[in-house]
Image (cartoon, coloured by chain):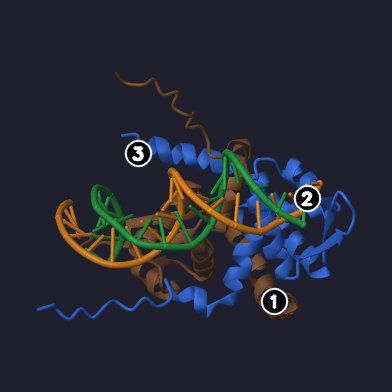
Chain colours: A brown, B blue, C green, D orange
Amino acid sequence: MSVSIPAAQPLPPNVMDAMCPSRQVLEHVTSRWGVLVLAALLERPYRFSELRRFIGGVSEKMLAQTLQTLERDGFVHRDAQPVIPPRVDYSLTALGREAAEQVWALARWTERHVDDVRRAQEVYDEARAS
Amino acid sequence: MSVSIPAAQPLPPNVMDAMCPSRQVLEHVTSRWGVLVLAALLERPYRFSELRRFIGGVSEKMLAQTLQTLERDGFVHRDAQPVIPPRVDYSLTALGREAAEQVWALARWTERHVDDVRRAQEVYDEARAS
DNA sequence: CGGAATCCGTGATGATACTG
DNA sequence: CAGTATCATCACGGATTCCG
């Protein structure tokens, strides 16, 4: 005799994701590797392995996944040349360039103020070293 | 006889985190709830539960955690009044306001272009529905 | 070279219950 | 009201292997 289990509705983990599609896009461009990919491509087009070396510390899987997401969103153009060995170039679309500039502006802002933040953190931490 | 295993160095999960402190700050302000908290506080100060209702879908734990992180970074000011029942108001610092404006600019950009992205995604998905 | 597929650990996230 | 503590989960990210 099996017990009838109501099976909690899988549904979206939280409501915002469904309500706010721009949230996903925001998470794509501000994702761990998304920021760095966009920043790199803002400079010039890159090949896959070139990008991997440039960014440093990213696994093949995550780089491929990040690039696919950004390509699907229409931010990155993928140019796969049918040669051997394979050669694939990635570059920004017009839309991607706009996004990259926004993200890059935010990234530069944080870089400029990282010292302010560090000091604030020290004050905060010391105040509760009680 | 046990085999001597070199034991892969635990070390930092990836190099960028250690190399680039601004990455952490960037992740704080662009985190799932960080963006929404900063956006809300850009409008006006909020109390805890008020903020929770306004944002919607955020657990107490995550909201508290997000606010603490942002406070530690010097973006958010926490004003706890010693009354009963407790009343705590959150507002932006000068630094936080700058950060919030940057983040909000990025958020607005994605909102404006979310339709472009949606169309790009449809094209992408259809092209490989092979 | 540029991936795709698989397995797997763990840290982030959320639900619940409790506290001052 | 404004949290903290505890526990369960699950998606993110890494390592490895295989393919065209």
Calculate the distance from the C-alpha at mark 2 to the C-alpha at mark 3: 46 Å
First in sequence, mark 2 or 3: give its number: 2
State the residue position of label 3.
Answer: B128
Q: Nearer the viewer, mark 2 or mark 3?
A: 2
In the rendered view, does A85 fall on the left or right side of B122?
left
The three-letter amino acid code for the residue at tag 2 is Phe
Determine whether D4 is above or below A105 in the image: above
The three-letter amino acid code for the residue at tag 3 is Arg
Calculate the distance from the C-alpha at mark 2 to the C-alpha at mark 1: 22 Å
Q: Quadrant of residue A99?
A: bottom right
Chain letter belonging to callout 1: A
Say which quadrant the N terminus of chain A sits in. Answer: top left
Q: Which residue is nearer to you in this view: B86 or B128?
A: B86
Give me the residue at 51% from left, 78% from top.
B18
Same chain, labels 3 and 1? no
Label 2 SS: helix
Q: Which residue is nearer to you in this view: C11 or A92?
A: C11
In the rendered view, does A86 fall on the left or right side of A4?
left
Q: Position of residue D2 (x, y in %)?
A: 77, 53
Give me the residue at 76% from left, 60% from top.
B101
Determine whether B72 is above or below B113 in the image: below
